[in-house]
Amino acid sequence: MKNTNLCLIFHCLKDDNSLDNDIHSEMFVHRKEVEELIIQLKKEGYVFKLPQDAKKGEKVCTFTLDDGYANNKIFLDIAKKYEIPFILFLSSYNIISQRPYLWDTFTKTEGHMYHISKFDYIKYYNEVVTDPSLGDNYRPFIEKELHSFNDNSYAKIALHSHYHQPYVGNFLEKCEEDLNTNREYVSRFSNTLLEDFALPCGLYTKRTISILKKKCQRIYTTDGAGYKAGSRVISRISLVNPKVGGPLMDQIKSSFKLKNKLRRFVAIKKYSHPNLL
Ligand SMILES: [Zn+2]
């Protein structure tokens, strides 16, 4: 991890232990665990900045939050307390429709995940009329809550697709339309990064990157390990509940190991893994 910039992803935050046996509990990281990680990273000499502000020779760490879960509002306090700029990557369909995220409703209904690179999100959303009840911890932000991010000088809202359909295979041809819809929605807010796009499920091909480079300045993957200052493709490290993945700092360090990169690749090929969301 020497002289490497880090870009971290969280999906869901919590401040109690009530969710440890619920669906996708691996996505939830406790506020205390996030704060402990920040203190450890500071001790290791990391400074907290956005990737576009990283300079050569610095050890920069960026915090990102994906999808738009309302529980992410916990990070607003953390950001102010430790002075941490961060990016909230929003999938706009769920915010607009106020429907829970597909991986949560599908798992709740079917008891397992779907194949993330082949599943048709739009078809599913059209076919399923009634969503299962999931509770407040799984709901997306309502627009009014997102406006409170405008008052936090550390927050930036950026792009994460409209439907969260991965931009691969047959879905690649519709990616520009999907990206435009997502950008149009995110433009409603004032503190935005409209040129920063996080890949849904972190999935991509060479063609995905080539198309997106014409539309965005920075593309964020979930490939693990670090990134170099000035990169347009930013590799991020997805962090999960330490009860599942071990201490957060160990998760960061192990994402640099080749065998873990291969394990992720196999997970995508075979089916889905929740920390790829
Ligand atoms: Zn996502």
Image (cartoon, rainbow, N blue to C red):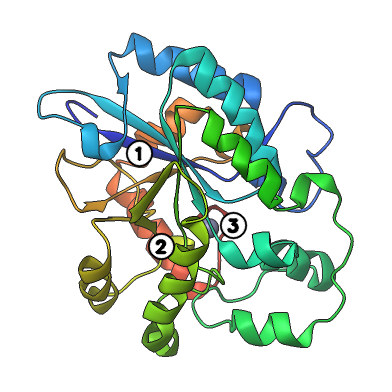
Mark positioned earlier in the residue sequence (3 or 2): 2
Dot 1 and dot 3 residues touching (CB under 8 Å): no
**Mark 2 element type:** loop
Disc 3 residue lies near ligand 1 with CB under 8 A: no
- Residue 67 lies, in percent from the top left, at 57, 54
Observer-side mark, 3 or 2, equals: 2
- Residue 234 lies, in percent from the top left, at 27, 49
- Residue 232 lies, in percent from the top left, at 20, 53
The amino acid type, in three-letter code, at marker 1 is Cys
The correct choice, above or below, for 272 with respect to 120 in the image is above
Q: Distance between the residues labelled 3 and 2?
A: 15 Å
Judging by the rendered image, the residue that carries numbered circle 2 is 199
Front in this rendered view, residue 58 or 245 = 58
Q: In which quarter of the image is the C terminus?
A: bottom right
The amino acid type, in three-letter code, at marker 2 is Leu
The correct choice, above or below, for 19 with respect to 200 in the image is above
Q: In which quarter of the image is the N terminus?
A: top left
- Left or right, residue 150 beside residue 217: right
Q: How far apart are marks 2 and 1 (CA)?
A: 14 Å
At 67% from the left and 69% from the top, the residue drawn is 113
**Mark 3 element type:** helix
